[in-house]
Image (cartoon, rainbow, N blue to C red):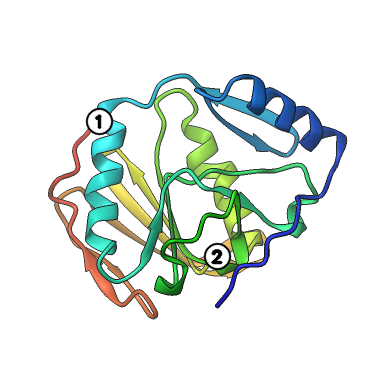
């Protein structure tokens, strides 16, 4: 597998986003349907949960954080930076500025306190549309995980919910069960 990522579709929205992103490199910015969302600070609780999930996957997969993720079907109006993106281990060591969504097997989003609907609603549709097989939402506000599977259009046909502390099974090709005991509520 080799990721061949061309420049994103150059819409006016993408051009403005790239200018903003270049001007403020210390901020975490994403664009969903032409609207820019900015997070000024990733809390240590958020980061600890990202690490707790990512650490379980790293020995078998290429695990990336905050990688620019693009999909042609988003028509140049969306650029997402998942908390965790998981791809085939053959991608380890790649230094792509952007990563094609169709090469990602699993995305993980830890729900933000400031914009929870982005993680629990808007991004779900975008990841399903891109055909990403698995999307895990870690929700420290509710103390639960929600794993989506079987993308179909702009939604997922399958889902599994688990409270923090319960295992989250992920099917093929990930084929493992995530331990959520280290996760906690905000």
Q: Earlier in the sequence, mark 2 or mark 1?
A: 1
Q: Residue at x 45, y 23 (%)?
A: 114
Depth check: give the residue in front, 55 or 153: 55
Position of residue 118 measured from the top left corner of the image (x, y, whole percent)? 54, 36
Q: Are marks 2 and 1 in contact (CB under 8 Å)?
A: no
Q: Residue at x 47, y 68 (%)?
A: 91
Q: Residue at x 52, y 55 (%)?
A: 95
Instruction: Tell me which corner region of the image, top left, top right, bottom left or bottom right, holds residue 48.
Output: top left
Position of residue 22 measured from the top left corner of the image (x, y, whole percent)? 65, 26
Depth check: give the residue in front, 174 or 20: 20
Judged from the image, the secondary structure of the residue bearing numbered disc 2 is loop
Judged from the image, the secondary structure of the residue bearing numbered disc 1 is helix
The number of callouts visible is 2
Estimate how packed mark 2 is, as few (under 14), some (14 to 19) or many (20 or more) residues with alpha carbons within 10 Å: many
Q: Residue at x 59, y 20 (%)?
A: 24
In this image, 22 relative to 65: left or right?
Answer: right
Instruction: Name the quadrant of the N terminus.
Output: bottom right
Instruction: Tell me which corner region of the image, top left, top right, bottom left or bottom right, holds residue 178.
Output: bottom left
Instruction: Name the quadrant of the C terminus.
Output: top left
In this image, 115 relative to 59: left or right?
Answer: right
Position of residue 157 relative to residue 111, above or below, is below
Q: Which disc, if any, is residue 45?
A: 1
Position of residue 3 measured from the top left corner of the image (x, y, whole percent)? 61, 68
Q: CA distance from mark 2 to mark 1?
A: 26 Å
**Pointer 2 residue:** 132
């Amino acid at each position: 597998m080799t990721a061949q990522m061309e420049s994103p579709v150059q819409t006016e929205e993408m051009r403005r986003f790239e200018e903003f992103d270049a001007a403020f490199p210390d901020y975490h910015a994403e664009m969903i349907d032409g609207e820019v969302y900015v997070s000024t600070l990733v809390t240590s609780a958020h980061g600890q949960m990202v690490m707790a999930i990512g650490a379980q996957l790293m020995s078998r997969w290429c695990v990336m954080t905050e990688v620019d993720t693009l999909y042609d079907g988003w028509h140049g109006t969306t650029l997402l930076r998942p908390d965790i993106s998981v791809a085939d281990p053959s991608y380890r060591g790649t230094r792509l500025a952007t990563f094609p969504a169709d090469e990602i097997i699993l995305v993980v989003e830890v729900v933000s306190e400031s914009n929870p609907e982005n993680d629990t609603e808007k991004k779900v549709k975008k990841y399903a549309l891109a055909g990403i097989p698995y999307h895990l939402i870690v929700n420290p506000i509710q103390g639960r995980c929600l794993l989506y599977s079987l993308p179909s259009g702009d939604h997922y046909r399958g889902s599994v919910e688990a409270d923090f502390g319960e295992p989250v099974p992920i099917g093929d090709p990930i084929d493992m069960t995530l331990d959520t005991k280290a996760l906690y509520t905000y």
